[in-house]
Amino acid sequence: MFPRDVYTFYDSENRTWSGRNVPLLYNPNQSIGEFVWQILSRAPWKIAQISADSGVRVTYHEMRLRSVRVAQNLASIGYETGDVMTIISRNNQNLAPVVFGCFMLGLSINSLDPKFHRDDFAHMFATVKPKVVTCEGDLIEEVKAACEMANIEPNLIVFGPRVNGYTRVDDLLVETGLERQYQPTKIKDPANQLAIILCSSGTTGKSKGVCLSHALCVANLTTVWPSFESDRVLCLSSLYWISGLATLLTATASGSTRLITTKPFTARMMIALMEQYRVNMIFFPPSHALAILNEPTVGMADFSSLRLVMCGGGPVSANLKRSFEMYLSKGQFVVAYGMSEVGGLAAISDVAYKDGSVGVLSNQVKAKILDDDGNLVDIGEKGELLIKKSFVFMEYFGNSEATEEMIDSDLWLHTGDIAYFDEDGLLFIIDRKKDIIKYAGYQISPSEIEDVILQVPGVNSVCVVGIPVEGNDLPAALVVKFTGSEITENDIVDAVASTMNDIKHLRGGVYFVSELPMTPSGKPLRRKCRDIIICFHNEAKQSVH
């Protein structure tokens, strides 16, 4: 099916594309807390959440009651609208009521990845200065050290067993006696009131805080895919990922049942969960899809319950899509394209697909392509993809300069992705203008790894790039030694491994050259460095075989 003039439309005069303009399902002129408070009462008997770890099932009525208690008990402690709570947690059974309770009270949430090192925590703590940090007990020491590094003294609340007298999340779930009288906090201007701060990697170093409004959460994140009350939904992403937040809100809005676990991804576990709980919808990055396909037992797996498989967060090849579809008896495998700054999806392949595309633009999304000189290009020509949507991110927290680089004066969002539209209106993402490496769905700034490598004795200069493989970029370094240095590949690999978290390790290897290709101003030509590394990498693979 060709979607042009049905699902996607071209304005030849302004050379812009747009998706359909269907009215929003939910009114964005309300807080996400008000929305959740109302939606949780729609089908109180339905199962909202199943913990695969403990088997505990929570109904929508119980979820609403717990969320209200969190809001009331946080208010009694003294927290109020506008305060920031940082949450660092896997998908445990009390995470959702804490998030919903914060939304109901009007607290802003900053969600961080439990896999972060203390340096990463400290950077975000110093950026958003949370009044309270809620984390899992095994992270307390890392969090305390990060707070000291950031020179802040927030209150700490702990998921799970009591630790050294800290407040527990269970303390926020105690009965108040006033649950029936509760009304969520009214937000006067939902489009400009901060609801959640996600993380986005920059090209020059540490993460930036992506600020999403209450209106955006209601408008964009409650209808990411067609979801039904009968669905059982599985997504292993924590709330650090916009996919994790979208799963929580979309599944809740539709009355679906979310399946959660705190365990890290393995292909065998994912298959077992899909089979045991008859999962209807899953959302995962291409690296997870590839791992499932490579799992020896996949041929015996029963995927007959799957209605929808969404894959995004990195390049999804036509081969990966087709290979997974071979195991779907009646389900659909769709490619999704989006980013935190867009506040969800920008394109999806549910109604149309061609090899290598990400489908067509989503509802109420406009797009155009600009060349290197900022000029509009014609159909089929490549350039940077710009997106416009009714609601996108508000700003990078405390970083007006980066915000102005991302959103121009006409409110077009510069994605940093190189793309083109074909004659039928399908969008193809072919490269990145920005120097971001994507591994396992994470965005990695090359300069972060370069800073660590430059501290290794014997290193003169370095350029870090990603080696593209199926579903991932493998971080790799091109290094120039000082004359006489005897530094080895293992020295550099070990230095990065001992300093940085697992996703930033040099899985693509280290390669030595006499000099780096440079611009006239003395900066490494990253594209040429990548070409050199890919040649070295391919030669190394051939020599092994």
Image: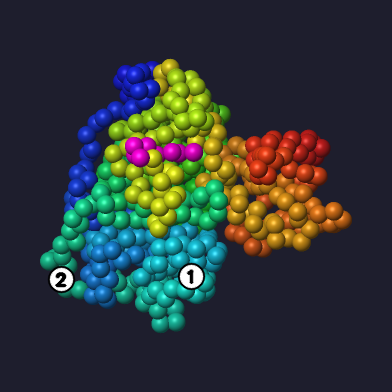
**What percent of the width, then of the height, locates residue 255?**
26, 47
Does 342 appear above or below 506? above
Q: Are marks 1 and 2 in contact (CB under 8 Å)?
A: no
Q: Which residue sits furthest bottom?
A: 165
C-alpha gap between disc 1 and disc 2: 38 Å
Residue bearing the label numbered 1: 150
Label annotation for residue 178: 2
Q: Residue at x 22, y 39 (%)?
A: 25
Residue type (three-letter) at the residue carrying disc 2: Leu
Residue type (three-letter) at the residue carrying disc 1: Ala
Q: Residue at x 75, y 54 (%)?
A: 460
Q: Residue at x 37, y 25 (%)?
A: 16
Image quadrant in which you'd find residue 132:
bottom left
Label annotation for residue 531: none
Image quarter where the C terminus lies is top right
Q: Alpha-carbon neighbours of circle 1 within 10 Å: few (<14), some, or many (≥20)?
A: some
Mark 2 element type: loop
On the question of residue 245 being in view, the answer is: no
Q: For this rendering, which residue is in front, 54 or 310?
A: 310
Does 396 appear above or below 105? above
**What percent of the width, then of the height, locates residue 425?**
40, 22
Relative to 479, is 126 on the left or the right?
Answer: left
Relative to 81, is 524 on the left or the right?
Answer: right
The magenta span reads 409-416
Q: For this rendering, which residue is in front, 513 or 312?
A: 513
**What percent of the width, then of the height, locates residue 290?**
56, 39
Relative to 175, is 495 on the left or the right?
Answer: right
**What percent of the width, then of the height, locates residue 363?**
31, 33
Q: Nearer the viewer, mark 1 or mark 2?
A: 1
On the question of residue 443 being in view, the answer is: yes
Image quadrant in which you'd find residue 485:
bottom right
